[in-house]
Image (cartoon, rainbow, N blue to C red):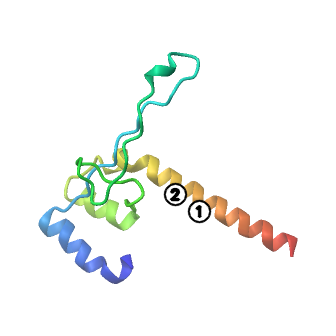
Amino acid sequence: MLKKNLKYIEDLILLHKFTPFPPRPKLPQLDLNNDPHNHHPPIPEEYPPKDGYENNRQLNIHLELVILWKKIGYNEICNDVNDLVMQGALLILSLHRIGFVRQLTR
């Protein structure tokens, strides 16, 4: 789908300076060794987001888009989405490994 619409997306980014909302910040994790009452309930993700942050499940990052965003000066894109990129890379690697193991067991 990205390849099909890349020209339109490129125009949005380069001509109109379109950038995604930043990903929602991570909440502090509950430390069971400390005060258990210091737990923050998760913020429900709505679509479209109403709090100024992008829903992590809705945000897809592609190299082509990162390059375009850097061209318009959005250099923080790598810091903003690095965790999502790493999660995606690990998911892809694990799926490839599962496929490789299935091929070996056939």
Single out the residue that lies furthest toward the bottom. 4
Q: Is residue 59 above or below residue 76?
A: below
Q: Quadrant of residue 57?
A: bottom left
Say which residue appears at 35% left-offset and 83% top-offset.
4
Question: Does residue 36 lie above or below 68 as drawn?
Answer: above
What amino acid is found at the position of numbered circle 2 in the picture? Answer: Gly
Q: Quadrant of residue 20?
A: bottom left
Q: Residue at x 67, y 66 (%)?
A: 96
Viewer-side residue, 20 vs 27: 27
x then y, percent, for residue 102: 79, 70
Three-letter code for the amino acid on which mark 1 is drawn? Ile
Q: In 3D space, how far apart are the residues under numbered discs 1 and 2 (Cα atoms)?
A: 6 Å
Residue at label 1?
92
Look at 52% across and 52% down and name the residue there: 87
**Could you say which is closer to the camera, residue 33 or residue 14?**
33
Q: Which residue is mark 2?
A: 88
Assign the C terminus to one quadrant of the image: bottom right
Which secondary structure lies at badge 1?
A: helix
Q: In the image, 91: left or right of 43?
A: right
